[in-house]
Image (cartoon, grey):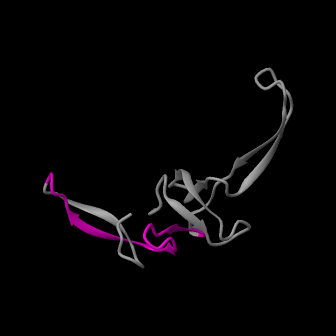
Amino acid sequence: MKIRKNDKVMVIAGNDKSKTGKVLKVFPKEDRIIVEGINIRKRHTKPTQRNPQGGIFEKEAPINVSNVMVIDPKTNVPTRLGSQIILDDKTGKKKRARVSINSGEMI
């Protein structure tokens, strides 16, 4: 999975299409992510000792990774991701960096 926590993404399919948000949590085994302000679900809860008020709570539900695209930091447009092998100056080892397909900018 190429999408990571704190990436800025845009939803490209579903009810929240064309909305943007930051990735809060990633579930790689299920290919799902939680995005801030996207796929809001309401939960009705009874009053309990822990929560004496009760009421209706809203929280984000996971969505499939295939329904989002990472936003390019340079052009601010959704883009696909590629990888590029770069040489680390400090250690001298090779590292893989995520790169935007449109602009070539490292993410």
| Residue 102 % position (x, y) | 42, 79
- Where is 53 relative to 26, above or below? above
Image quadrant where one finds the C terminus:
bottom left
Magenta-highlighted residues: 67-91
Q: In this view, does 39 lie to the left or right of 35?
A: right
- Where is 32 relative to 55, above or below? below
Residue 24 forms part of the magenta stretch: no
* Residue at position x 48%, y 52% in the image: 5
Residue 90 forms part of the magenta stretch: yes
Residue furthest to the top in view is 49
* Residue at position x 60%, y 55% in the image: 35
Viewer-nearest residue: 31 or 51:
51
* Residue at position x 31%, y 64% in the image: 97
Numbered-mark total: 0
Q: In this view, does 41 lie to the left or right of 78?
A: right
| Residue 73 % position (x, y) | 44, 66
| Residue 23 % position (x, y) | 55, 54
* Residue at position x 56%, y 55% in the image: 22
Quarter of image, res 9: bottom right
Viewer-nearest residue: 64 or 89:
89
| Residue 99 % position (x, y) | 36, 69
Residue furthest to the left in view is 92
Viewer-nearest residue: 95 or 71:
71
